[in-house]
Image (cartoon, helix red, strand yellow):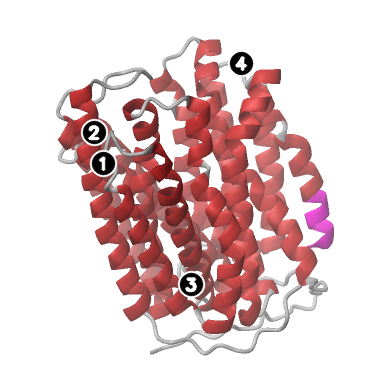
Amino acid sequence: MRRVHEDTTIDSPACTPGETRPGIVLAVLAVGTVLAPLDSSIVNIALPSIAAQFGERLSAVSWVTTAYLLTTASLLLSMGRIGDVWGLRRLYVAGLAVFGAGSLACAFAASLPLLVGARVFQAVGAAMLFAAGPALVTRTFPSNRRGWALGYISLAVSFGLTAGPALGGVLLGAFGWPAIFLINAPLTAVVAVVAWRLLPNECPESQPFDAPGALLTAVTLLLLLTGLGRIEEYGLASVQALGPIAGSAVALAAFVAWERRTGHPMVDLAMFRVRGFTSGVSAATLAYLALFSVTFTMPFYLLRVRGVDAHVAGVLLTVTPLAMALIAPAAGRYSDRWGSRGIATAGVLVLSLGLGAASLMTPASPLGFVVPVLGLVGAGMAVFQTPNTAAILRAVPRERAGVGSAFVAEARNVGMSIGVALTAAIVGSAVGGQGLPAGTDGLPAGVAAAFSTGMSNALRAGVVVALAAAALSWFGRAVEPVEAAPPTP
């Protein structure tokens, strides 16, 4: 097996690397990392208020979320490469500045089109943050402490996802929807100043940026995610869904051909010959696909099938990210000591167990059964996610840390999108052509039973996908040499 070892960055006479203080770097990155997932989870609760103020339908207002997700996903790889060429500290601070400016623009948007445009600008900053954060961890921490550090980054992401709905509800009730964006401005300003002062200076490689490769990557991902997003509305075999997906395949072929020809490719295709990288990215995509079979269906099950109050449902749905936040640091720490192969495999096996338990739920199941099931799902994902991310970044050359970090985030986006599309198609086939009745009221008994059947089928499919991720985690990578980790603070 070919193994990629970390390289040292070559210093140029005009560049003096800054002192690296790992604890401070981790603290700054953890605080900054909270912002993007906090914003993504906080916005959904405000969509009805935004629709009411602008007099728009919810289907139109959904672009406030969709535009953000598509922009972030399509720019991640490009931003990762920009970080490698331009410097990760610069990219991270610039990302905070762009994210904060976009948040201000969102808060003062006078119409829905202006708000969607501001969300696109805000998403550019989010893509910078997602690409730079884990890469900075890779360049700051030695391999035998990287899992521990990435565990706290995962904790920050889970905290943002968990706190978002509750904080959004408070701000929405007290100040109105602009406040959920306005709060980002002072936070990003403070973190940007601290990050510029405390994150180490870098001496990035002096290479031209592959603009054609970046464009082809963005087109590939944009078309793929657009097509997957249309499956729920138009069906799996529809022209509206298959057209963009076919276009994505053509763009991907053009991207691979270009990257093989150019002297300074955006993505070094040789990385895919490294087992730890390819199996890690593939397993992550499958794990997120499996996870979103329950993430997508559970809100409908609680609100429409069981008739649970929205506040109670919100609390129940925080069980998964809360379990991830509590367990991720320990999973990362133990992966430093024992290697990621066995721990990551155990994680997706626990995830498959949680999905299997969830598939047993019916309209008559005890509501208390939801808590341990969602806790099991979150625990399994936490045990898998951090060690797997550490293994991916360990397999990437140091000078490609930004691109490697972007692939980690991209696996999450693609897996999530495929998971939602596949789950919606399975549930839709069980419910029938009429689909779920509009509104927030409980479903008729027959429709509720059909939804429950479709949900069980989707979750069983998720079990199969999670088991495939486990096989990739175990058989797709070699046993890693593990160095003794120093005591962690």
Contact (CB < 8 A) between labels 1 and 2?
yes
- Magenta segment, which residues? 192-199
The amino acid type found where label 3 is placed reads Ile
Specify which label sits upstream in the sequence, 4 or 3. Answer: 4
The amino acid type found where label 2 is placed reads Phe
Which quadrant of the rendered structure holds the N terminus?
Answer: bottom left
Q: Is residue 19 left or right of residue 257?
A: right
Residue 30, label in figure: none
Name, please, the residue furthest toward the top: 55
Q: Quadrant of residue 132?
A: bottom right
Q: Give the labeled residue for mark 1.
A: 455
Residue 451, label in figure: 2
Task: Say which residue appears at 31% left-offset and 29% top-offset.
Answer: 305
Residue 110, label in figure: 4
Residue 47, how many percent across, how many down? 51, 23
Task: Say which residue appears at 53% left-offset and 83% top-offset.
Answer: 338
Q: Is residue 447 left or right of residue 218?
A: left
